[in-house]
Amino acid sequence: MGSFKAAAVQMRSGTSPERNAADMEILVRQAAGQGATYVQTPEMTGALVRDKEAGAAAFTTEDKDIVVATARRLAKELGIYLHIGSTAIRRADGKLANRAFLFSPDGAAIAGYDKIHMFDVDLDNGESWRESAAYEPGTEATVTDINGTKLGFAVCYDLRFPQLFRTEAMAGAEVLTVPAAFTRQTGEAHWHVLLRARAIENGAYVVAAAQGGLHEDGRETYGHSLIVDPWGRIIAEASHNEPGVIVAEIDPAQSLAARRKIPNLKNARDFTVSAGTSEAPRLRGAAS
């Protein structure tokens, strides 16, 4: 269980899977050239398409998807673990999944994850999103092994559901992953603090590759890809929304050290929630 270099690839995916796959390849090669043996791309690497009809035309099955094929080839050629943060995949039943893939250095797909929590929100600036109208949510968390280090999966909006990350940490994950396409508004408010919180409360590294900038379909994403260590320190950041690569050293021993200092995973206890009773003590400062 030795140290390794991890890279987060920041992109600005457009509406063409072919162009996005080509852009991804350039950045993945750059990351591998900097010594990264684990490389993560953002959510919706293959295409960001807001129009449902256009998306239906752009997205295809896993065996025909150009991002999947490109990633498989690059992982084998470069001898790296390549984590496609997610891309839209048409399932056998015709529904779409927001699906992550992890390819090993021999080009095999060794893990996958379908985003569980759908981004159905109405923001103050008039933005309204209904991810559940286009995608079928996943139902299973994923923790897999890369050279003795356990990796837990999540995608974007999953970040706001700490129970997912706690479950993966309890299953042994020392590195938690959050590829994303955070909106500019929510990213400016919450991106850094949520990623650091997930790292701190689980004693785990967090690697979060992001989409950034103004996209072809009109949306604007925050960028600022991050790698956070198990003590909550930001050890690499793209401090902008432009495409690029960040790299940091991952030492799984640091996760163990953080969990020894603050053993909250071991100290967790089951509990119930009570509705209270009429004899419950009055809180100090309560109105009389």
Image: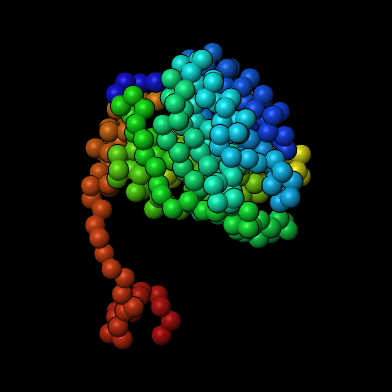
| Residue drawn at x 72%, y 34% as measured from the top left | 16
- Please tell me whether residue 91 is drawn above or below residue 226 in the rendered image: below
| Residue drawn at x 65%, y 60% as measured from the top left | 122
| Residue drawn at x 58%, y 17% as measured from the top left | 30
Q: Is residue 38 left or right of residue 61?
A: left
Q: Position of residue 101 (x, y in %)?
A: 49, 35
Can you name the residue that lies furthest to the front here? Answer: 92
The answer to which of 73 and 154 lies nearer the viewer is 73
Q: How many marks?
A: 0
| Residue drawn at x 35%, y 75% as measured from the top left | 283
Q: Is residue 83 left or right of residue 150?
A: right
Q: Position of residue 284 (x, y in %)?
A: 36, 74
Q: Position of residue 197 (x, y in %)?
A: 43, 45
- Which quarter of the figure has residue 1? top left
The answer to which of 219 and 141 lies nearer the viewer is 141
Q: Is residue 250 left or right of residue 247?
A: left
Residue 172 in view: yes
Q: Position of residue 14 (x, y in %)?
A: 72, 36
- Please tell me whether residue 257 is drawn above or below residue 219 in the rendered image: above
> What quarter of the picture does the C terminus occupy?
bottom left
Q: Is residue 18 left or right of residue 276?
A: right
Residue 201 in view: no
Q: How is the image coloured?
A: rainbow
